[in-house]
Amino acid sequence: METTTSGLQLNTRRRWLADAVELLSSMRFAICLLAMIAIASVIGTVLKQNEPMNNYVNQFGPFWFEVFNKLGLYNVYSVWWFLLIMAFLVVSTSLCIVRNAPKMLKDVRSWRENVREQSLRNFHHKAEWQASMPAADFIRYAVARLHAAGYRTKVVSKGEAGDAALVTAKRGGASKWGYIFAHSAIVIICLGGLLDSDLPIRFQEKMYGKTPFEGSGIIAQIPAEHRLGEGNPSFRGNTFIPEGSSSNTAILQRSKGVLIQELPFTIQLDKFVIEHYSTGMPKLFASHVTVIDHDTGKRFATVIKVNQPLIHKGMAVYQSSFDDGGSKLKLVGYPMSGNASTTFAIAGEVGGSTPLEKGHAGDYTVEWSGFRPFNVENMANNGQDVRAVNAGQSFNERFSTSLNKQFGSAAKGADSKVFKNIGPSVQYKLRDKTGQAREFHNYMLPVETEAGEVFLAGVRDSPSEGFRYLRIPADDNGSVDEWMRLRAALMNPDLRAEAARRYAERALTGSDAATASLREQLRASALRGLGIFAGAEQDAGYIAVSRFLQKVPAAQQEKAAEIFMKILNGTLWDLWQAARAKDGLKPAEGNEKHAQFMQVAANALADSFAYGAPVYLQLKDFTEVKASVLQVTRSPGKNIVYLGCLLLVLGIFAMLYIRERRVWIWVKSGEPSNAHALMAMNAQRKTLDFDKEFTTLTQQLKQSGAGAPEKPVN
């Protein structure tokens, strides 16, 4: 049977109908549809599907977000054009089966016994010889040999007088079934996929007025028009359950809001268990749940793990992920503006919000967005602080490094990996009265670096950015108190003046008039340097220092920078001592540890001006509450898809590994004790194995008697 790419030829006077049916049933059209589905599947794999729309806006920007949204790329497998392609593929493949399957089945049943002797001589693979036995005995011998080789045979009398016979044999007819199975599998898989799509939900939205819910509130209070009944035939949603809580609904994400799917049972999370690898990646997470059936009231306990779902009432409940379930947090707030150095206590719950008192930070609200009880980070090179100043660099190089690596990064290089748990962290947003917000990520415990122990305080302006980390040095008590005291002193003009006076007196101790004049000049320079660093003139930190030095002639900048930094570092030391004296504390010892503390503190002071927060919140205590995210699905097309996959495997195996072969042997009576045999063999795919099989079968048949072939074997 010949293979053609043309479609079903419909016998009708309507030419457009005939052309449409021919196109739909043609192989070229089906291949184009498969290519389009493959491209759409690649898009659906690369681009995360069914994410909140804000994530796509942050990722692509407003313009491309609208373009991709119009094309439906955020939900490729449910968009109208993808479902239309699937429907056309089902129709096209079905027409191909209708057109070709009857011909193939007829060909499988056919023995092709109407061949003639001359036709056999035109075959490429043929042989002809004299057998030294009567024709009847040779026919029985040939049939036995063919049966032993796996062929089915049929003997047909030929010739008017019945003096000739045709032995026809066939093998590998199942290859035709491979075509039927493979094409039927495509139809079955597509139908199963359509059953598992959101077509039932769209139907309910169209016919029953179901609309997505776009607000916020308690699930139990959401109106009925935003809820789907337990009889919904197909859906895929998530349910979020904190430890000790329960849920009888699932959330279905839609392009505009969510739909609430009612479940015929309640899932109560008794305990959530999570284990980790040394790298901090989850190794195992499982939900110990109690299921309560609404119809019978029966309760049973089970464990839901990854790849070990709960199957109940035709629904599958999978372990999808985990999250914080509303951990209770206690923090201490440090004001970051003005001269304030007093702390205040603040508490919150993950997922909630807490207003800041106006006396501490103005009109702000803290939105608690996340908490992690531990964080495993790559602390290669002893957690080297990429913001640390290298003493071997020039001042300009240090400034370049400082500006190019503003705030640095909490992530370490990938050259070497040393994983270490650096303790709990809290994530929150500070939102002002205009609705603008920045997100912060602060660690509870100090992290060991080459520059000493530092507290990491991350900040970012939008979720699409990575966190930039301010590194606050830990003092002798392992806290941020001394750095906060130094920062508050830097904002105090009186303490800056006292620090400049102390520095000048410490640097120049003489009592003569010349020394006193130089001391006054040094005091004024130190005071102005502190003012520039504190932002009294315009900018603040090292940026302000760099701009001030740009006014110095280029030839003198290097020397001026060294003098400026020497005075600044010395004055900062005296500023710290003045702040401690003001608070009734004894002076800090002038040792190497405190010198290192001052170096990191100066960098942190410079970076703090870009921190962008009125307060720094440090986690002090917490009560963790875990939560499990379960995916609930009803997939009536799943078993249909499994059947299609089985048929597809069988069909491809049959088409690739089963070869149809046919053998014809024309036998005529010759001399009383001899038979004349003409053999021909054919296969759809000519291979080296086929040539070898033809040669072997010919040699076996010729062993029935002596006699050389009249024509060479091809």
Image: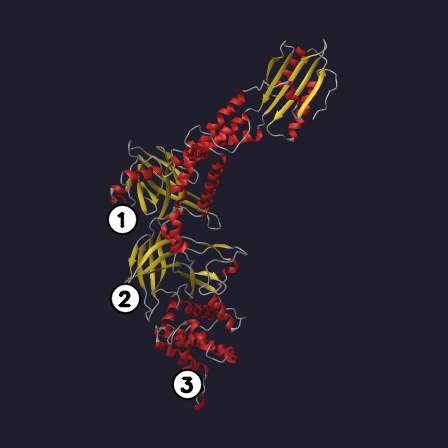
Residue 393 can be seen in this image: yes
Question: Where residue 297 sits: x, y (%)?
Answer: 28, 33
Q: Nearer the viewer, residue 301 or 20?
A: 20
Amino acid type, mark 2: Gly
Residue occupied by mark 1: 217
Can residue 55 be seen here? The reply is no
- Looking at marks 3 and 2 on the same chain, the residue that comes earlier in the sequence is marked by 2
Residue 357 drawn above or below residue 179? below
Residue 681 vs 328, above or below: the answer is above
Image coordinates of residue 296 in percent, x first then y, are 29, 31
Q: Earlier in the sequence, mark 3 or mark 1?
A: 1
Q: Image check: 508 left or right of 360?
A: right
| Residue on which disc 2 sits | 359
Check disc 3 and report the residue beneath it: 520
Figure check: 353 above or below 311: below
The residue under the point 46% across, 49% down is 281
Which mark is in front, 2 or 1? 1
- Residue 521's mark? none
Mark toward the viewer: 3 or 1? 1
Horizontal side of 79 relative to 381 (left or right) equals: left
Badge 2 marks a residue whose secondary structure is helix
Residue type indicated by callout 3: Glu
